[in-house]
Image: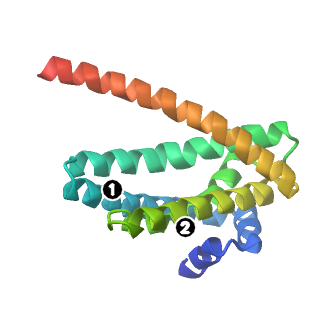
């Protein structure tokens, strides 16, 4: 697994093709997403603890948004956009490849370090986006241009969906806090 994570971070297209074609990597892709989410959530919680935030809330918010919204929603959106552009894939194939594309997000654990931490975490995000384009290309079996278009259109839909979900979650939180106290 470590070797595949390193290949994912190195943006090795043969890894993404291998993962797309083999269902045995589904659980491993999920494990990578969980590990990356935990690392990012720990970094966010430490950052919140060092500031005036609430580390436990930050930990769980980061964990939830990275796993559920960051991975699964992105896979579903990329699947539908890609198939509209005549790509050939399945949602699980897309989820597997994008699961591995999350590997550079491990750098998120360093987000709490003053000055350089946010830059390192941002580098992880940029690498994950690049890996996402490769994952989409290999999963959908089309050229890089269509993969970039899928990623851009998919990312716009993904951001809108996250905003809607955040508003809904914020509304639920506001209702809960007004009822409880």
Mark 1 = which residue? 44
Q: CA distance from mark 1 to mark 2?
A: 16 Å
Mark 2 = which residue? 104
**Left or right of residue 135: residue 144:** right
- What is the x, y in percent for residue 108? 43, 63
Q: Quadrant of residue 179?
A: top left
Residue at x 27% of width, y 22% of height: 174
**Left or right of residue 35: residue 171:** left
Q: Are dots 1 and 2 in contact, CB under 8 Å? A: no
- From the viewer's side, name the closer residue of 133 and 26: 133
- Judge the density around disc 1: few (<14), some (14-19), many (≥20) Cα neighbours within 10 Å: many
Task: Tell me, yes or no, if residue 25 can be seen here.
Answer: yes
Q: Quadrant of residue 139?
A: bottom right
- What is the x, y in percent for residue 28? 55, 66
Per the image, label 1 sits on a secondary structure element best described as helix
Q: Quadrant of residue 104?
A: bottom right
């Amino acid at each position: 697994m470590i070797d595949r994570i390193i290949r994912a971070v190195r943006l090795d297209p043969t890894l993404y093709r291998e993962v797309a074609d083999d269902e045995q990597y589904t659980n491993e892709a999920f494990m990578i997403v969980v590990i990356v989410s935990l690392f990012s959530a720990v970094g966010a919680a430490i950052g919140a603890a060092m500031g005036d935030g609430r580390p436990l809330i930050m930990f769980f918010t980061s964990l939830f948004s990275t796993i559920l919204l960051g991975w699964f929603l992105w896979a579903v959106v990329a699947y539908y956009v890609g198939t509209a552009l005549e790509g050939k894939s399945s949602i699980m194939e897309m989820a597997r490849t994008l699961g591995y594309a999350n590997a550079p997000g491990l750098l998120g654990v360093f987000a709490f370090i003053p000055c350089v931490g946010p830059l390192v975490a941002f580098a992880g995000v940029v690498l994950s986006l690049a890996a996402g384009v490769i994952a989409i290309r290999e999963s959908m079996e089309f050229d890089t241009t269509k993969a970039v278009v899928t990623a851009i259109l998919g990312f716009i839909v993904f951001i809108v969906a996250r905003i809607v979900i955040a508003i809904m979650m914020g509304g639920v939180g506001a209702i809960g806090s007004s009822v409880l106290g």
